[in-house]
């Protein structure tokens, strides 16, 4: 293979970003081609590289970048089935996002800088995927963090966007600090930052502190991939433009942490304690985020919590020792979650609101956006993992459940990366039980989302003060990017159908041993009978429970006798009469007393505010007081003292010679008296 091809994959989007920034404002007509063409060409090249590499093959190339006095830093490329597969996903999603953004942000004056940041974001993820050196990987890792800060805060004139971008940056950096120390430990023990050398050292048992190293790395993964307890930034990041949400959630930032653990899986297999910690982290993330998704009113926040939960599935597969199942679900999820966000953007464009309960009162919304209606339905079926071949979500979710089942039996599917006994059975049981419960909840919140957005009938209107969303619901609105009176342009519709293809068909690739398994580690990705029946059955139960609760609540609303616990008052959407509508929300019925806490993320943000934000603010105020009132007081006091002394001396400087002589004589007399005495 010509090394120029994999080198060009991350280089082209980076060059496109520089060109867009350089000429975007001076020649706005060039901004869109410069945004789309380099990313699209990189996507094609990533596919060509994957095809040329084939299955079961690897490619390593490196040149020393700089000496460090210790382990050298190398500009290294490592290609295998995992990097090839994920790079194709990154290229596909990034191209769809760039095309979609040309219409979604058509009138945005800051589109050139936005497009340049998306291209740079894409280049950074390509660098993470292709890098064979941990320090170079860290560069791409941090560039993504910076790009996310600017992209989430694209609408910086709104307070929500500013606070969300800052929160995302700080929370992820909180995980990146221990992550950096983990990389240093790996480099010191292995004598190299090359990933191949690190894995060789792990295989030979030369890592001195595998548990400590793995836990430090997991801190960075928790921040980047939004796992408990560093998950709180991702729902708030919905204040950014919808295409950015699709890029972050599907193929770049949140996928990077999962991909890193998959690449370093032999390191984690050396520490059963780290795998149990990862399993607990995944379990809490899965269940908690699914409960929160069932209570949200903001369409994008539902999808955000859904992403957090699906990342928990991937982390659970890794905790079970099966990186194949994890990456399988990562790619499957990348396709249908990008589709969900882009379809949500079309719906928001048409409804002019993020609130699903406000959307439920818009008559004929599904007829207004037929492309979004059908493609969102396809993506939600994949998300739920209903047993409807060939939808990808069913196969990838069942692969995760099968991995957890084998780990619980003591037969972890490590595929030769380590002994099956390296994975504690407790980790398998934790993941299996939490993943099964999450399948039930996923079916419920996906059904609620679809029914309220497209099928909920309006009830009896009662006078109320108009607003844009439910008063007690967290809400991350965007600035209106387009006129809702105009139909969605083709650039916003065709990417939906492009992403619908892998959403419907990719899962079949896991069934054939010569297809996806051969590209990865060679293990089986076929679902086992027990977990397939259990997982699918629980998903169907969740769907039916949400549907039944919706029908029951709808019937109560239709008769004008809604239950107090099921009341959902939704304010008027822009352009509608100033009235509030009672909406049949099955989430209230299903969650009962948990609905309020789940809507607000079970108070985790408030807890962090009390434990961390307030003490830091109080300490900052104390430092400010000491600086201004104490330190500055001493500084000002010394200046005032010198000034007063100068004034006193100035009074003696009269310019009269007789006064000077008199003073001199008086001093001589005084000295003589003192000497005589």
Image (tube, grey):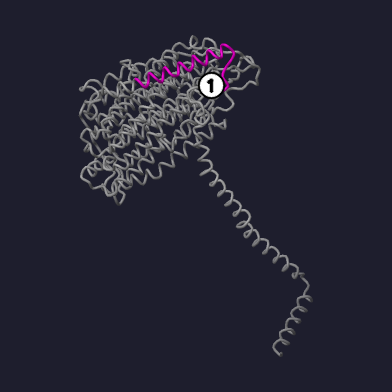
Q: Is residue 569 visible?
A: yes
Quadrant for the N terminus in the image = top left
From this view, report whether residue 50 is shown above or below residue 611.
above
From this view, report whether residue 267 is shown above or below residue 491.
below
Front in this rendered view, residue 120 or 28: 120
Q: Position of residue 128 (x, y in %)?
A: 34, 34
Q: Is residue 539 magenta?
A: yes
Quadrant for the C terminus in the image = bottom right
Q: Position of residue 136 (x, y in %)?
A: 33, 39
274 relative to 596 in the view: left or right: left
Residue that appears at 41% across and 44% down? 177
Element at label 1: loop
Crowd rating for badge 1 (residues with CA inside 10 Å; few <14, some 14–19, many 20+): many
Magenta-tinted stretch? 537-566
The picture quadrant where one finds residue 99 is: top left
Q: Is residue 5 visible?
A: no
Q: Which residue is mark 1?
A: 355
């Amino acid at each position: 293979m010509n090394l120029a091809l994999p080198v060009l994959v991350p280089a082209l989007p980076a060059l496109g970003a520089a060109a867009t920034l350089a000429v975007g404002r001076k020649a706005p007509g060039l901004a869109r081609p410069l945004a789309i063409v380099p990313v699209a060409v990189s996507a094609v090249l990533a596919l060509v590289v994957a095809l040329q590499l084939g299955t079961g093959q690897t490619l390593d190339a490196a040149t020393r970048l700089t000496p460090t006095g210790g382990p050298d830093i190398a500009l290294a490329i490592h290609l295998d089935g995992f990097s090839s597969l994920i790079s194709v996903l990154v290229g596909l999603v990034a191209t769809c996002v760039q095309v979609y953004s040309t219409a979604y942000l058509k009138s945005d004056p800051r589109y050139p800088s936005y497009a340049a940041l998306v291209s740079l974001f894409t280049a950074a993820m390509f660098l993470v995927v292709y890098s064979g050196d941990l320090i170079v990987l860290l560069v791409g890792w941090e560039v993504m963090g910076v790009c996310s800060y600017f992209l989430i805060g694209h609408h910086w004139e709104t307070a929500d966007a500013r606070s969300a971008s800052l929160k995302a940056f700080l929370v992820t950096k909180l995980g990146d600090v221990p992550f950096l120390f983990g990389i240093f430990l790996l480099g010191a023990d292995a004598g190299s930052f090359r990933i191949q050398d690190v894995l060789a050292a792990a295989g030979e048992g030369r890592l001195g502190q595998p548990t400590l190293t793995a836990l430090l790395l997991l801190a960075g993964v928790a921040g980047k991939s939004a796992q408990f307890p560093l998950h709180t930034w991702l729902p708030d990041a919905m204040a950014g433009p919808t295409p950015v949400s699709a890029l972050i959630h599907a193929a770049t930032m949140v996928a990077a942490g999962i991909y890193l653990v998959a690449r370093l899986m032999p390191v984690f297999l050396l520490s059963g304690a780290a795998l149990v910690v990862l399993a607990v982290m995944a379990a809490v993330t899965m269940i908690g985020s699914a409960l929160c998704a069932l209570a949200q009113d903001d369409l994008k926040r539902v999808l955000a919590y859904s992403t957090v939960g699906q990342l928990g599935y991937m982390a659970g597969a890794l905790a079970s020792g099966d990186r194949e199942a994890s990456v399988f679900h990562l790619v499957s999820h990348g396709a249908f979650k990008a589709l969900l966000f882009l379809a949500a953007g079309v719906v928001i464009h048409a409804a002019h609101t993020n609130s699903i309960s406000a959307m439920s009162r818009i008559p004929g919304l599904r007829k207004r956006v037929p492309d979004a209606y059908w493609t969102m339905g396809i993506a939600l079926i994949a998300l739920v993992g209903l047993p409807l071949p060939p939808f990808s979500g069913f196969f990838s979710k069942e692969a995760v459940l099968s991995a957890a089942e084998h780990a619980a039996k003591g037969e972890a599917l490590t595929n030769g990366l380590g002994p099956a006994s390296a994975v504690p059975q407790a980790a398998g049981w934790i993941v299996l039980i939490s993943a099964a419960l999450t399948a039930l909840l996923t079916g419920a919140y996906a059904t609620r989302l679809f029914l309220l957005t497209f099928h909920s009938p309006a009830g009896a209107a009662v006078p109320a003060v108009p607003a844009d969303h439910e008063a007690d619901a967290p809400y991350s609105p965007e600035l209106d990017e387009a006129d809702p009176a105009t139909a969605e342009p083709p650039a916003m519709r065709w990417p939906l159908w492009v992403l619908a293809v892998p959403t419907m068909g990719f899962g079949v690739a896991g069934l054939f041993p010569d297809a996806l398994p051969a590209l990865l580690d060679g293990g089986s990705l076929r679902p086992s009978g027990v977990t397939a029946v259990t997982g699918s059955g629980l998903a169907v139960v969740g769907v039916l429970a949400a549907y039944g609760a919706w029908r029951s609540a709808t019937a109560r609303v239709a008769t004008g006798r809604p239950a107090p616990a099921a009341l959902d008052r939704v304010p008027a959407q822009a352009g509608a009469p100033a009235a509030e509508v009672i909406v049949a929300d099955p989430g209230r019925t299903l969650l009962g007393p948990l609905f309020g806490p789940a809507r607000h993320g079970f108070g985790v943000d408030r807890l962090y505010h009390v434990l961390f934000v307030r003490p830091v603010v109080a300490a900052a105020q104390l430092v400010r007081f000491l600086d201004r009132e104490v330190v500055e007081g001493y500084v000002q006091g010394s200046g005032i003292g010198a000034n007063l002394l100068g004034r006193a001396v100035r009074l003696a400087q009269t310019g009269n010679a007789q006064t000077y002589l008199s003073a001199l004589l008086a001093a001589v007399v005084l000295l003589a008296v003192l000497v005589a005495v």
